[in-house]
Image (spheres, rainbow, N blue to C red):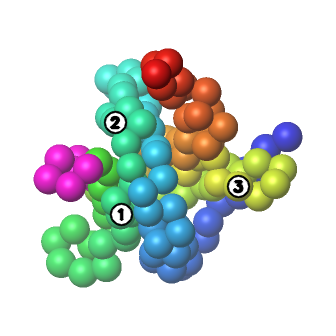
């Protein structure tokens, strides 16, 4: 059974910085869920480059998630986040990071499990 916990706002910057360092290059999927526009896939199985809370400038308070390969990065920005939840497995592994903004739109960042990635990768052709 998974465990969901909310990350307190005052801990967002440190949590996201640590998460970004630990999970860099981990395959993630990003889904956006918006009451007005419905569900949308933002990014399918791409390596995490960075996830950070903007702490200065005109983007103060925004969360930016960057995924992709060098030269082909995609950045998804949550302008006014209100809540940040971590969904963890029984073993304590992060499975999903949920971010809800002030308009009640949600961004789900799914951390792909290695076993699932291995199953999805076809075996090499016989020699």
Residue ID for mark 2: 43
Q: Nearer the N terminus, badge 1 or badge 2?
A: 2
For label 2, the crowd category at 10 Å Cα-Cα, with few meaning under 14, some 14 to 19 and many 20 or more, is some
Single out the residue that lies furthest toward the front.
Answer: 127
The x, y position of residue 62, in whole percent, is 32, 63
> Which image quadrant for residue 45?
top left
Q: Which residue is mark 3?
A: 93
The front one of 110 and 33 is 110
For the residue labelled by badge 1, is the local secondary structure a helix, a strand or a loop?
A: strand
Answer whether labels 3 and 1 touch (C-beta < 8 Å).
no
Which residue is situated farthest in the top direction here?
126
**Mark 1 Cα shell of 10 Å, populated few (<14), some (14-19), many (≥20):** some
| Image quarter (top left, top right, bottom left or bottom right) of the N terminus | top right
Q: CA distance from mark 2 to mark 3?
A: 21 Å
**Is 23 located above or below residue 121 in the figure?**
below
| Residue on which the image places disc 1 | 50
Give the CA separation, mark 3 to mark 1: 18 Å
**Percent coordinates x, y for residue 120 in the rendering:** 54, 25
Q: Is residue 120 above or below residue 112?
A: above
Q: Is residue 75 magenta?
A: yes
């Amino acid at each position: 059974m998974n465990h969901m916990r909310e990350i307190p706002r005052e801990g967002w910057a440190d949590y996201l910085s640590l998460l970004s360092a630990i999970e860099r290059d981990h395959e993630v999927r990003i889904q956006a869920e918006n009451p007005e526009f419905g569900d949308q896939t933002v990014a399918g199985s791409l390596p995490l480059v960075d996830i950070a809370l903007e702490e200065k400038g005109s983007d103060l308070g925004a969360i930016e998630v960057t995924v992709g390969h060098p030269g082909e990065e995609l950045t998804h920005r949550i302008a006014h986040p209100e809540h940040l939840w971590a969904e963890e497995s029984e073993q304590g592994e992060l499975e999903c990071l949920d971010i809800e903004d002030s308009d009640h739109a949600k961004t789900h960042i799914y951390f792909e499990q290695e076993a699932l990635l291995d199953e999805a990768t076809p075996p090499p052709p016989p020699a």
